[in-house]
Amino acid sequence: MGEHITRHPEIAWVDTAERITALRLADLTAVPMILRGSAADIWRALGSVHTVAALVEAVADVYGLDDEHVAGDIAAWLVDAVEVGLITRAE
Amino acid sequence: MSEALTLAEAVPLGYAVLARVAQDAGVRMLAIKGPILAMQGLRDPRQSVDIDVLVDPCGFAALTAGLEAIGWRDVSVYGRPCLVPKHSVNHRHPRWPCEVDVHHWFPGFLADPGATFDLFWERRTTVDIADQSLPALDAVAHGALAALHYLRDEGRSLRSADLEELAVVMETHWTAEQRGDLVALAAATGAAEPLAPLLRSLGLGVPEASVPLAVSLYDWRLRSQSRAPGVLPWLVELRRSDWRRRPSVLWRALWPDARQLHGVDLADPPRGIELRRLRLERIARGARALPAAWADHRRLRGDVRG
């Protein structure tokens, strides 16, 4: 849980409150990615936290839940996010 | 099915895309206009509808090729005479709601475009757009560019409110040093005469150009002072053409290709009866504007001969 996670530096993104639109600059032909709801809140939280534990705590706060309630979903989201190039993670 | 981008998303993302295309092509590029004007306090924030960049003229072909390679098509209209040299191309993409305007020169900066770009590049700044740091014109150079954009239609008073707003910013929020820098920049980029209305309104002197002009000051005056910018370029081209070319110029002016008509969908240009109707309407508009265009041409020629 102590690994370092950050938004990928080659993601250009815009937050219009309703959704987050993200574009991988390494592939300018790709369709932009849209994040809504909890995915968008996770992305926003990554602006100020850089460990999985801190991310879980921050997102749980947003929803008024215990950390355990969101940890699993965040872990799954992080796996997908790494795969599509949205975030980087390092030990 | 992918979701459509809104303008609020597309414009900032588009600037980031252009910067990346330029970087990949090894081309120097500066972000201009749009949201950058508001970031630099040069105008109130408002939604931009397109993406504007100024590129090193030497890299212009490489940058536009890079855009084409990722699906942005050149939708510029060619073959229509311009009072100032063609200075930009417009690109569109089927999935994006905005245009990209790639400028290799900006009208009103009448010195050599390459040297002018080098000067802008030396004094560039960076702006954060879409979480990316992009090279951009510094605030003083950008103020000059914005003013020239508004002054381009001075004869029709189209952007006088925008110019006044800009002048107020320069007068009330800029330091004396910045205003002095504006004067020096005008001299160094061949923009002294084009910017003269702004400089005088700020109580600043209009300097002599400190570099040779590569673009005709007379043509700038024609463009900026004309009250009939749709007709005047054709008049000028007719007068400047060898007499053997004049019939073909006149034919193109009166009966243009469908893609030359203003506001048409270039992917699906008009045909048949609709095309004929548009052409006849255009001839009627041109006929109504011809006296003003002729008067402009005579007046502005007289000013130069002065």
Image (spheres, rainbow, N blue to C red):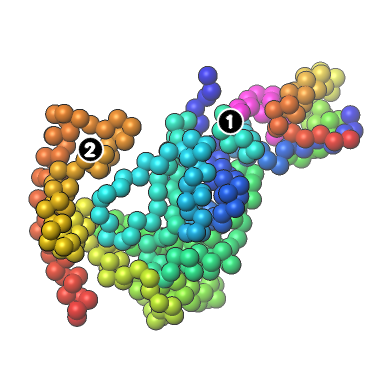
Residue at the image point whose x is 56% and y is 42% from the top:
B17
Residue A88 position by quadrant: top right
Q: At which x and y percent is residue B242?
A: 16, 62
Which residue occupies the foreground of this view, B152 or B65? Answer: B65
Residue B278, horizontal then vertical, whole percent: 16, 37
- Say the numbered circle drawn on residue B47: none
Q: Quadrant of the C terminus of chain B?
A: bottom left
Please tell me whether residue B162 belongs to the stretch shown in magenta: no
Q: CA distance from mark 1 to mark 2?
A: 33 Å
Bin the neighbour count of mark 2 within 10 Å (Cα to Cα): few under 14, some 14-19, many 20 and up: some
Q: Which residues are magenta?
A: A33-46
Residue ID at (53%, 66%)? B118
The relative height of residue B104 versus residue B210 in the rendered view (above or below) is above
Pointer 1 chain: A
Name the dominant secondary structure of the magenta segment. Answer: helix
Residue shown at 13%/34% (left/top)? B277
* Quadrant in which residue B240 is drawn: bottom left
Which mark identifies residue B258? Answer: 2
Q: Is residue B18 left or right of residue B144?
A: right
* Chain designation of label 2: B
Query: Is residue B150 shown above or below B283?
Result: below
- Amino acid identity at mark 1: Ala
| Quadrant in which residue B83 is drawn | bottom left
Residue for badge 1: A30
Total labels drawn: 2
